[in-house]
């Protein structure tokens, strides 16, 4: 996670927490369903403000830790999901003992990691038969206005990995095996202000100049005006949640 944009999110932790969508419970449950019953030691890596952590915390018998390289994001997570142990670290350098976990999950994060180094390191901390789960919430660009919104905000590494024209999905290496994938479609009602905050939580805008950010927001408002969306109304923003899981050999 050495890219400047990968470690920029702490500067916009408030926007990230307020405007990014939560993960559907059924998608998170699918990542975990192949585990045997009983205690589940789970690490949420690249946990950010805890969007995925809070869903994991509802899993039966789950013992959760949250790991992120950014102390500002972890501070926001502790406020949003009290009582979850937090640690600084990355997928390539985890502060966990060998074979101490049943599951490692990454929400909206694998596109920032070195997949070979991360697979090897996660393989170190996950027991044989354990799970690596990856999940993304991506706007459904089959809707024309959503495609135009993405063009204005600029596409992200996540969108290119999961939905790009030549994408084959995330690369997962040994000691993990076959990768399974599942998708869920849903909509999220959002006001114009919420979509603006969602844009401000994206790495492109966080690292852009003030002039670039102003121009993006002006173009977004022009799109919303064309759609007839005033500041009080909501618009249904369609999403596709894509989840992957792979079992450690």
Image (cartoon, helix red, strand yellow):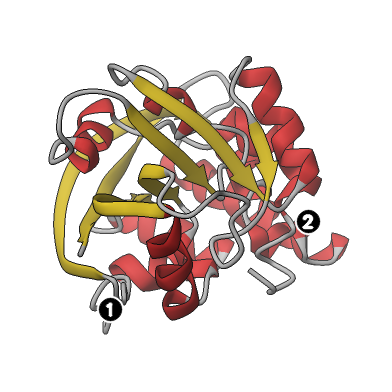
- Up the image or down, 148 lies above or below 95; here it is below
Percent of width and height locating residue 231: 59, 25
Q: Is residue 150 visible?
A: yes
- Up the image or down, 36 lies above or below 111; here it is above
Question: What residue does disc 2 label?
Answer: 214
Q: Is residue 67 left or right of residue 191?
A: right
Question: What residue does disc 1 label?
Answer: 167
Residue 26, quarter of the rendered image? top left
- First in sequence: mark 2 vs mark 1: 1
Residue 12, quarter of the rendered image? top right
SS of the residue under disc 2 = helix
SS of the residue under disc 1 = loop
- Up the image or down, 55 lies above or below 195; here it is above
- The image quadrant where one finds the N terminus is bottom right
Q: Residue at x 71, y 40 (%)?
A: 73
Residue 194, quarter of the rendered image? top right
Q: Nearer the viewer, residue 55 or 138?
A: 55
């Amino acid at each position: 996670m050495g890219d400047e944009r990968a470690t920029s999110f702490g500067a916009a932790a408030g926007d990230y927490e307020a405007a990014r969508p939560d993960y559907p419970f059924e998608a998170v449950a699918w990542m975990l369903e192949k585990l045997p019953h009983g205690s589940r030691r789970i690490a949420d890596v690249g946990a950010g403000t805890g969007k995925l952590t809070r869903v994991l915390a509802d899993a039966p018998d789950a013992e959760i830790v949250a790991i992120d390289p950014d102390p500002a994001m972890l501070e926001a997570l502790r406020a949003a999901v009290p009582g979850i142990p937090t640690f600084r670290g990355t997928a390539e350098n985890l502060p966990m003992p060998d074979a101490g976990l049943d599951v490692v999950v990454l929400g909206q994060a694998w596109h920032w990691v070195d997949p070979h180094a991360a697979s090897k390191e996660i393989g170190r901390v996950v027991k044989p038969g354990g799970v690596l789960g990856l999940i993304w919430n991506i706007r459904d660009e089959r809707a024309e206005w959503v495609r135009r919104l993405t063009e204005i905000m600029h596409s992200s590494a996540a969108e290119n990995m999961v939905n790009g024209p030549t994408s084959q999905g995330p690369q997962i290496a040994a000691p993990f095996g076959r990768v399974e994938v599942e998708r869920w479609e849903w909509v999220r009602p959002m006001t114009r202000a919420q979509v603006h905050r969602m844009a401000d939580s994206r790495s492109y805008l966080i690292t852009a100049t003030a002039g670039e950010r102003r121009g993006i927001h002006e173009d977004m408002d022009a799109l919303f005006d064309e759609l007839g969306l005033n500041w009080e109304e909501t618009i249904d923003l369609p999403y596709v949640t894509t989840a992957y899981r792979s079992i450690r050999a």
